[in-house]
Amino acid sequence: MDLKVTRFGVTVGDIIYDQMAEQSVDTEFTLPDYCPDISRILKCRVKPRISSKSINGAQIGIDGVIYFTLIFADGENKINSYEYSMPFTKNVDVGDPAEYASVNVKAKQNYMNCRAVNPRKVDLHGAIGLFVKVTSKKTAQIISDIDDIEIQQKLGTANATIPMGASEKHLIVEDEIELGQGKPSIRSLIRCDARAVINDTKIISNKAVIKGELMVSALYCPDPDGRPQLLESTIPFSQIMDVDGITENCECDTSIEVISFDLKPRTGINGEVRNLMLESKLCVCATAFCNNEVPVLFDAFSTKYDADVVTEDVAFEKIISQINERYSCKKTLEFSENAIGTVVDLWCESQVGNVKKDNKNLVINGTVDICILAYDSDDMPVYYERPVEYEYNFELEKSPTIMKCEPQVEAIAASYTLFDSSRLETRIELNISASVFDVGKIPLVTEVTINENSPKKKSNDIALIIYYADSGENVWDIARKYNTSPKHICSINDIKGDNVTQDKMLLIPCV
């Protein structure tokens, strides 16, 4: 029997690949002539950045650059640095073709060994972790209605956040950063960092308007001589993005990443370097979601024939909270006596360790690595690194059944108080942004087949059956058991809802 079936396509994000690929590092470089000899390596900073990614069948192509910043002391115990970059290409086989999928790649250092082969040459050996996630749009064709009076249907709605569209755009930020009054001019740069955060996202006229900040910090050696100086600047930016299917009723999940960053000293008319020319490329991603009530069919049966009913667990995701706030934590660090005389620079690198729910609370645990460049009490340059654990709690509007959340945590500021040569208090400001989804799997009817060759047996001698129902019993289950209409049961027995509210005798009509 051909049924007149109304179908509804439910689109959900289906993760088809989520693994880490390793990019090995085995290289060396020689210092240029303008750099002094290496007396002692203080720190080799490793910053991998993804410049592009592409899809070709089941192959994901990843291009990037690994930036190495060697911070070292020379023979006069002065702090110097040199930056070396290594481009790389990595192909990842995801198993199945992913032409219509979105690809997200995060890169971080797995391990790195850095050693001076001689005062001019440095050897690097280690690996970078490329965390690749491929998400495709999967459409489940569920039945929302059957036009047949012989078919009893348990209809309803499911709340879902439907992915409407996604967009990725590169944004160029250029600016000229000037030294403040009283700051000595620049001889050379030691460390440069850029961190981007999104402060606000609005949906206007089918577009996403994104506003944020690029926070730049630079440690430099002054000219002609002296202790290194820190320069910080915040540059606002905005970006308008076209996102397919986005409306004012949608919500937008946004993320941002610095994929390239260049800071160059600019010599003025008088020969002094008091300006830095900034050029940075940011990758902005926006995904639109629309909250809908989707018509669904939970169950069905025929009162006339045997029927095969196929159900499928469909995962519905709903955004229950969006987070974009600052979180501060502090920690007192202990060192050996006379370990720190003067702090030259302090910066942080953050990472997320664990995301979980605790009743109605979202809990994010992670680590912030505190990096300290200093001179000890004997005026020797030293470098220390200390991990500081943090725990962030956010009260959700409701407790999710299954929670999905991939937060971005960025250490955007750090300050300190040096109590004495062995004790330092640090204060860290983190920017935390996240969309929290409640994921619920619901068994829904996807196919109904009526077997006309197998009619149900009926007794024409019985018009009503007496049934003693317990409080809380579901009317649909009773109707299915006795092959009758739930509406008829409710009408004859004056039942207003889906369940029997008290122990009572029911009259079950035989149809």
Image: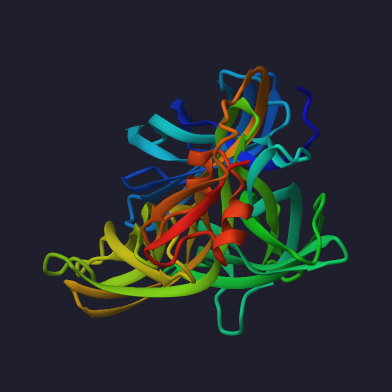
Residue 74 in picture, x, y percent from top left = 36, 50
Colour pattern of the rendering = rainbow
Left or right: 489, with 254 as reference point: left
Q: How many marks?
A: 0
Quadrant location, the N terminus: top right
Visible residue check, residue 34: no
State the image quarter where residue 38 is shown: top left
Tell me: residue 195, above or below residue 145. below
State the image quarter where residue 202 is shown: bottom right
Which residue is painted at 55% across and 79% down in the image? Answer: 183
Residue 470 in picture, x, y percent from top left = 36, 58
Which residue is painted at 53% across and 56% down in the image? Answer: 437
Which residue is painted at 59% across and 51% down in the image? Answer: 486
For the residue pair 441 and 109, the one nearer the viewer reads as: 441
Q: Residue furthest front?
A: 461
Which residue is painted at 69% across and 41% down in the image? Answer: 11
Quadrant location, the C terminus: top right
Q: Residue furthest top?
A: 453
Left or right: 260, with 442 as reference point: right
For the residue pair 132 and 265, the one nearer the viewer reads as: 132
For the residue pair 121 and 223, the one nearer the viewer reads as: 121
Q: Residue furthest left?
A: 337
Left or right: 50, with 206 as reference point: left
Residue 360 in picture, x, y percent from top left = 39, 68
Residue 12 in picture, x, y percent from top left = 64, 42
Visible residue check, residue 121: yes
For the residue pair 35 and 87, the one nearer the viewer reads as: 87
